[in-house]
Image: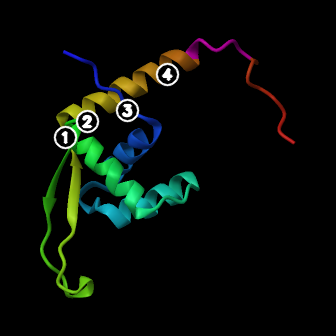
Amino acid sequence: MKRTYLGELEEIVLLTIAILGEDAYGVKIMEEVAQQTSRSLSISAIHATLHRLEDKGFVNSHMGGATAERGGRRKRFFTVNQAGSRMLNEIKKLRQQLWQQVPSGLLDWKMG
């Protein structure tokens, strides 16, 4: 079976879904990513990433109820599933292993 990898934005969005829990939908995810990373992304970029994560089998989605504040439109909510949780744990473990191998003092550069 071919191994599935995540790009940086996919990883950030997947982590953001985990952070938001039951309140993870497109606009809220976009706002949280901007707050956490200081990156301004379009809602189209977020939706494309969410679709890729769902296609890769890392998130599940469901439609919420219609609300008056959205003119009767429904929100699509996302949750990290078991495969997504495993992937995040694998990424975390790999990053920790790599950081532990960086020689002491190598990255202690003075900024500015």
- Return the disc, 4 or 3, that comes first in the chain's sequence: 3
Front: mark 3 or 2: 3
Quick one: quadrant of the N terminus?
top left
Instruction: Evaluate if marks 1 and 2 touch, with contact meaning CB atoms under 8 Å apart.
Output: yes
How far from the left and from the top, in percent, is residue 46?
Answer: 38, 55
Instruction: Evaluate if marks 1 and 3 touch, with contact meaning CB atoms under 8 Å apart.
Output: no
Secondary element at image label 4: helix
* Amino acid type, residue under disc 2 in the picture: Gly
How far from the left and from the top, in percent, is residue 104?
Answer: 71, 15
**Dot 3 corresponds to which residue?**
6
Q: Residue at x 45, y 64 (%)?
A: 31
Secondary element at image label 1: loop
* Amino acid type, residue under disc 3 in the picture: Leu
Residue 103, by quadrant, is top right
Q: Alpha-carbon distance for marks 3 and 2?
A: 10 Å
How far from the left and from the top, in percent, is residue 70?
Answer: 25, 82
Please state the extent of the stretch shown in magenta in the rendering. Answer: 100-104
Q: Alpha-carbon distance for marks 2 and 4?
A: 18 Å
- Return the disc, 1 or 3, that comes first in the chain's sequence: 3
Image vertical order of residue 1 relative to residue 67, above or below:
above
